[in-house]
Amino acid sequence: MYVNKKKANTREIIYGINAATTAIQSNPDKITAAWVVKGREDDKRIRQIEQMLSQIGIKAQVAMRHSLDEKTDNGVHQGIVLEVIATPPKDERFLENLLKELEGQRQLYLILDGVTDPRNLGAAMRSAWAAGAAAVIVPKDKSASLTPVARKTADGAAEHVPFVAVTNLARTIELLQEFNVEVVGMAGEATDTIYDYDFQKATALVMGSEESGMRHLTREKCDTIVKIPMAKGVESLNVSVAAGIAMFEVVRQLSVK
């Protein structure tokens, strides 16, 4: 189960080959314990992770599969589980400082408005990492957080892309706009497509929830609304897939200007 991050020095679980490898490489000082599954001693990937852990002074404990299943709530752990000091999400102050630091640069931000499935969050984080996004922004309420499932799906992205949870998303959009970031919402009923739109400057793409899309106030705050053109009869795409398509169109346009 995911731990309560409100307590000081609380722990959280990271599992899976890629997520564990990235955690060791990125934040070795936060790792407090590690377990590998009994019976996979000859797996080269597991042995490599054990060697990496040994180099930072952590000896992986051998555990039965059912024990790792329990630690990960039956997640696909691939035989490796880490316990780490929990990293809380970034906040509005962090975002404002980031915007000041990157002001004038044509950066990309991803806003997820009410995406509650941790796997969708993780997949969107992975795409944001690949697209070079400066941050992924979510509201604190009614949104998935970086649970072990989200981290596993993110496949290491959570260690590289700032994850910002804000109290008031509408106010955060206004903050982005103050720093000349164009806020572009995604909705299937829009007239213009992402291929019609001219992404000329720093951009924040807004993706709505899996069921109902963007909230009304979020939509009102956007500078414009665009869509991904789709074949007749297809109503929508998975939110993480749509986010990936849209982000890479922004990247494509920015790279040729």
Image (cartoon, helix red, strand yellow):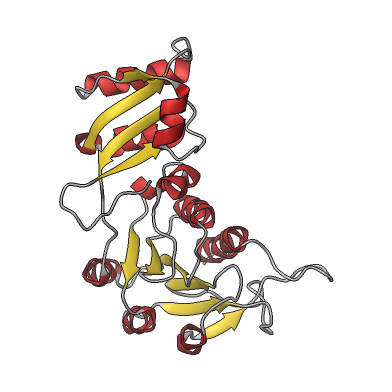
Residue toward you, 230 or 82:
82
Position of residue 176 measured from the top left corner of the image (x, y, whole percent): 35, 78
Position of residue 193 measured from the top left corner of the image (x, y, whole percent): 67, 76
Q: Residue at x 38, y 33 (%)?
A: 20
Position of residue 99 measured from the top left corner of the image (x, y, whole percent): 28, 71
Q: Is residue 16 visible?
A: no
**Which quadrant of the structure image shows residue 134?**
bottom left
Residue toward you, 100 or 141:
141
* Residue closest to the far left: 8
- Horizontal relation, residue 129 to residue 232: left or right: left
Q: Residue at x 41, y 42 (%)?
A: 156
Q: Residue at x 41, y 45 (%)?
A: 148
Position of residue 224 measured from the top left corner of the image (x, y, whole percent): 54, 85
Q: Is residue 211 above or below residue 133?
A: below
Q: Is residue 190 above or below residue 49?
A: below
Q: Residue at x 49, y 38 (%)?
A: 75
Q: Is residue 88 above or below residue 109?
A: above
- Horizontal relation, residue 25 to residue 153: left or right: left
Tally of numbered tags: 0
Q: Is residue 83 visible?
A: yes
**Which quadrant of the structure image shows residue 28?**
top left
* Residue closest to the far right: 232
